[in-house]
Amino acid sequence: MFSASIAPARPLRTDSASAGKAAGWLKREEAIMGTAIVVELWSDDAAAGEAAADAVMAEMHRIDRAMSPHKDDSELSRINREASAAPVRLSDEMTSLLTRAESFARLTGGAFDITYAAVGQLYDYRAKVRPSAEALARACQAVGWRGLALDRGARTVRFTRPGMRIDLGGFAKGYAVDNATRILRALGIRHAMVSAGGDSRVIGDRRGRPWTIGIRDPRRGNGDVVAVLPLEDVSISTSGDYERYFDEGGERFHHLIDPATGRSPKDLRSVTVLAEDGLTSEALSKAVFVLGVAKGLALIDSFAGVDAVAVDAAGALHYSQGLVAPQAAKP
């Protein structure tokens, strides 16, 4: 799964002494989907709060089991094994997600493309391994969302290019966060934040004040941030070139890949997108990173209710129109 870079404000902590309290903040963290899953919520009843946190983590595990490319028995792995030979029957959930992926690919001109996986699998960032020019050229022939034959009526998908693979890491965490917050709302939770790596969604506020999320400085440690955003009832996703990467010969190879070239884009260091849902914010953060500042922010400005902050290769900040002039209504 993709990792990212949102640094939430330090939340109130709970410990064993909080057990038995009728109301209060609860925080839970687990490692799922290859990243840190964190839920922080206010509950008027401690036991109900614990049950709500349990439900969030159970949903995260369920999505990981279905969509992980690293689990042989996941639905995603089955698709990658079988779809080159024949149409593969899909669950309703997977059909919906592939439909959304197709829509984002079309809207972004292919900057968001789940078939990038044919190239992505050739990189090992921990071992500092990258493909040769020849291997990269061969793998790029398998990339292209139009080669994904999705039959929504029959609920099947087939790969039409040799070597094609898909990966839902471009928006799976955002989707998982969306599901988790729907569960919390159904359980009566009105103040919460759920995060999966760099993808977060907040419900309500922090009981009288907004949630604050800092955008990490892409080139400095120690928790330094380049901007702090006050948030209520919104999703936020950050894609950065500093989570999974290695440097070689003065060039940075990172996990955000341009589907057209199979290489890491160099014009941006990070992109943060705010939207009504996490699936959209995560997918668009990846697309903007590939498109670059001008084309990427133009894309953001074409959506109502979506905004972005980008940090370019020189460290300069760029904002979408809604953040520069929030009083002006978007078309």
Image (cartoon, rainbow, N blue to C red):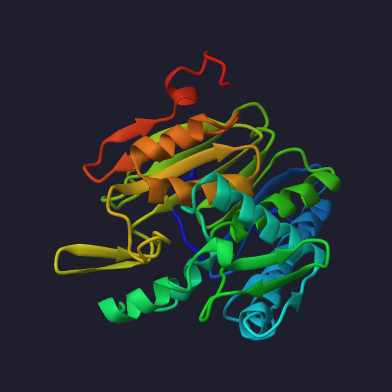
Residue 93 higher or lower than 323, as above or below: below
- The image quadrant where one finds the C terminus is top right
In the rendered image, the residue lying farthest to the top is: 327
252 relative position to 68: left or right = left
* Position of residue 67 measured from the top left corner of the image (x, y, whole percent): 66, 71
Toward the viewer: 324 or 27? 324
- Residue at 80 percent of width and 67 percent of height: 155
* Position of residue 86 measured from the top left corner of the image (x, y, whole percent): 70, 82
9 relative position to 18: left or right = left
Toward the viewer: 225 or 152? 152
In the rendered image, the residue lying farthest to the left is: 249
Toward the viewer: 139 or 27? 139
The answer to whether one can see residue 261 in this image is: yes
110 relative position to 87: left or right = left
Residue 266 higher or lower than 248, as above or below: above
- Residue at 39 percent of width and 38 percent of height: 295
Residue 16 higher or lower than 25, as above or below: below
Q: Quadrant of residue 271?
A: top left
- Residue at 70 percent of width and 67 percent of height: 63
The answer to whether one can see residue 11 in this image is: no
- Residue at 71 percent of width and 39 percent of height: 191
* Position of residue 212 measured from the top left corner of the image (x, y, whole percent): 52, 36
Toward the viewer: 78 or 154? 154
* Position of residue 76 measured from the top left corner of the image (x, y, whole percent): 65, 75
**How many numbered marks does the figure carry?**
0
